[in-house]
C-alpha cells in the first residue's frame, strides 16, 4: 500500500488513517465475491480511463468497492450520501493510503454535505454511483454543461431508484442508470438481511433497550421492513406492521404480524422504525398519540420519513441523554425519543450492513459499472435493471465462496421447460 505525500479530499482526522486501513482489510476478508472481481478487474482493466464519482455511505465495505473500481482502471472520487453515515477512519484511509479523493465527515452540516458533492462533481466524472440520487440531481440541476461527458450511472438504494424513475417519467433523466438496488442479489439479501440486522443493532447501541416483550412498529413492509420485522420477532418483540399496499399488508398478516393503521399503532408502540422511502410517514398526529418514552427511528434513506419540524413545534423542551438520542418533552409531560436525528439508524449509531451482505451488493455495483463502460453507447436515457447474467453470476460466486453446490438441469429437463407438447 502506497502512502501518498499529500492526502486527498476533506476528512475529519488524517491520524485515523492507519486504523481505517486495518478495518478496511478486515471487512475485505468477508467479501470474497468482490475480491474475485477486483482480481479480475486488475487484469482486464474494464474501467480504464473512466472517472467515477461516488456519493455513497463511506464505510469499510464501500472502501472495498472503491478499491475494486480503482483496480479496474477507474479514477474514483467519493463523498458521503448521508451526513451521519461516514466512518471517519475509513475516509482518512482512502485519502491517505489509497489515493482516492474522499470528501466526507461524520456529522457534517447541510452546507458541507453539498460542498462535498460539488467536490466530486468537480472531478468531472463520466459515471455516477449514487445512494439516494443526490449526485444525479445535483448534476442535472446545477451542472448540465457536464452531462455530455456522462456515460451512465448506478443507483444503490430504493429511495434513489424511486427518484430516478420520477426523472425518467418527467423526461429529464440525463443518462442511462442501472438500478443496482433491484437486483435479486441486492434487495433480497442486502435490504432484508442487512437492514434487518443492522437496524436492530443501531437501535440497541443507541438506547440499550430490551426489545423482548415490547411492541415494535415497523412502518412499511418492503424488503427492509420484512428484515426488521423478522429480526425484531427473533428477539422477542411483539411486532406491528403498518402499510398502504394491501398485498404487503396481507403478506405481513400471513407472516404472523399484527397489521394496523398508523394512528392505531402509534398508541401501542414502544419502538417505531420507518422503512418506506416516503415522506412524513410519522407526523404530528402520531407523535401526539405515542406513549411516554416511545422510541422513534428511521432506517429509510432520508430523515424526511419523520416530520421532525412538527415535533419541534409540539415539544416544550429537548435534551440529549445519550449519544444519538434526543428526548422531546411534550406539554402533557410525555417524552418522545428520536434516534440519530431521524437519519439512518443503522449507519449513524452502528456500522451499517455486515460486509458479507454488502459483498453481493457491491459486486453488482462493480459489474454494472463495467457493463456501462462497455455498452453505454447502446443504452437510452432510462433506468435499467441489472442484467440477469450479472445477477446470476454474483449468486454463483457467492455460493462458491460459501462452499455450497447446487444441481443443474439435465438436457431432458431443459427440453421439457421450453416445450408445450408434454402434458399429462
Image (tube, rainbow, N blue to C red):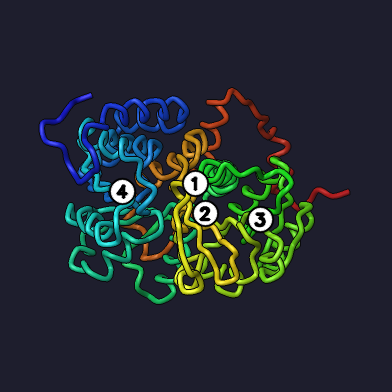
The residue tagged with tag 1: helix, strand or loop? helix
The numbered disc on residue 92 is none
Q: Compared with residue 126, is residue 315 higher up or lower down, i.e. above or below? A: below
- Pointer 3 or 1: first along the chain: 3
User: Marks 3 and 4: CB-CB under 8 Å?
Assistant: no
Crowding around mark 2 (Cα neighbors within 10 Å: few <14, some 14 to 19, many 20+) is: many
Where is residue 365 shown, x and y percent of the image?
41, 45
The residue tagged with tag 3: helix, strand or loop? loop
The numbered disc on residue 346 is 1
Where is residue 253 shown, x and y percent of the image?
77, 58
Measuring 61% from the left and 44% from the top, which residue is drawn there? 209
Measuring 58% from the left and 68% from the top, which residue is drawn there? 287
- Foreground: disc 3 or disc 1: 3
Where is residue 350 shown, x and y percent of the image?
47, 41
Where is residue 193 shown, x and y percent of the image?
59, 42
- Pointer 1 or 4: first along the chain: 1
Q: Nearer the viewer, residue 69 or 326?
A: 326
The numbered disc on residue 270 is 3
- Foreground: disc 1 or disc 4: 1
* CA separation in Å, label 3 and label 4: 49 Å
To which residue does mark 4 refer? Answer: 373
To which residue does mark 2 refer? Answer: 299
* CA separation in Å, label 3 and label 2: 16 Å
The residue tagged with tag 4: helix, strand or loop? helix
- Foreground: disc 3 or disc 2: 3
Amino acid at each position: 500500500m502506497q502512502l501518498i505525500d499529500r492526502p486527498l479530499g476533506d476528512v475529519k482526522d488524517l491520524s485515523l488513517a492507519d486504523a481505517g486501513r486495518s478495518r478496511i482489510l478486515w471487512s475485505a476478508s468477508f467479501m470474497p465475491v468482490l475480491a474475485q472481481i477486483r482480481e479480475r478487474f486488475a487484469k482486464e482493466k474494464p474501467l480504464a480511463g473512466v472517472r467515477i464519482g461516488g456519493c455513497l455511505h463511506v464505510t469499510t465495505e464501500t472502501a472495498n468497492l472503491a478499491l475494486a473500481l480503482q483496480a479496474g482502471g477507474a479514477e474514483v472520487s467519493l463523498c458521503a450520501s448521508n451526513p451521519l453515515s461516514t466512518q471517519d477512519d475509513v475516509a482518512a484511509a482512502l485519502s491517505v493510503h489509497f489515493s482516492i479523493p474522499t470528501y466526507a465527515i461524520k456529522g457534517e452540516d447541510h452546507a458541507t454535505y453539498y460542498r462535498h458533492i460539488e467536490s466530486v462533481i468537480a472531478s468531472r466524472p463520466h459515471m455516477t454511483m449514487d445512494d439516494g440520487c443526490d449526485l444525479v440531481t445535483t448534476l442535472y440541476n446545477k451542472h448540465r454543461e457536464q452531462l455530455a461527458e456522462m456515460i451512465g450511472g448506478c443507483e444503490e438504494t430504493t429511495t434513489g431508484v424511486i427518484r430516478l424513475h420520477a426523472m425518467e417519467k418527467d423526461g429529464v433523466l440525463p443518462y442511462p442508470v442501472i438500478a443496482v438496488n433491484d437486483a435479486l442479489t441486492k434487495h433480497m439479501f442486502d435490504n432484508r438481511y442487512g437492514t434487518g440486522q443492522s437496524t436492530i443493532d443501531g437501535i440497541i447501541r443507541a438506547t440499550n433497550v430490551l426489545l423482548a416483550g415490547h411492541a415494535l412498529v415497523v412502518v412499511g413492509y418492503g424488503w427492509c421492513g420484512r428484515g426488521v420485522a423478522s429480526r425484531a420477532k427473533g428477539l422477542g418483540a411483539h411486532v406491528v406492521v403498518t402499510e398502504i399496499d394491501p398485498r404487503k399488508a396481507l403478506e405481513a398478516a400471513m407472516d404472523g404480524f399484527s397489521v394496523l393503521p398508523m394512528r392505531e399503532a402509534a398508541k401501542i408502540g414502544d419502538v417505531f422504525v420507518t422503512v418506506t422511502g416516503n415522506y412524513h410517514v410519522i407526523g404530528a398526529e402520531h407523535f401526539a398519540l405515542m406513549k411516554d418514552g416511545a422510541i422513534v427511528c428511521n432506517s429509510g434513506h432520508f430523515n424526511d420519513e419523520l416530520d421532525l419540524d412538527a415535533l419541534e413545534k409540539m415539544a416544550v423542551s429537548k435534551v440529549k441523554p445519550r449519544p444519538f438520542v434526543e428526548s422531546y418533552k411534550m406539554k402533557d409531560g410525555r417524552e418522545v425519543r428520536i434516534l440519530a436525528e431521524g437519519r439512518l439508524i443503522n449507519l449513524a449509531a452502528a456500522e451499517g450492513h455486515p460486509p458479507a451482505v454488502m459483498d453481493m451488493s457491491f459486486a453488482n455495483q462493480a459489474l454494472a459499472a463495467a457493463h456501462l463502460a462497455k455498452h453505454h453507447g447502446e443504452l437510452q436515457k432510462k433506468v435499467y435493471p441489472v442484467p440477469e447474467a450479472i445477477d446470476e453470476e454474483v449468486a454463483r460466486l457467492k455460493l462458491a465462496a460459501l462452499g455450497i453446490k447446487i444441481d443443474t438441469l439435465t438436457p431432458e429437463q431443459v427440453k421439457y421447460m421450453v416445450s408445450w407438447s408434454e402434458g399429462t
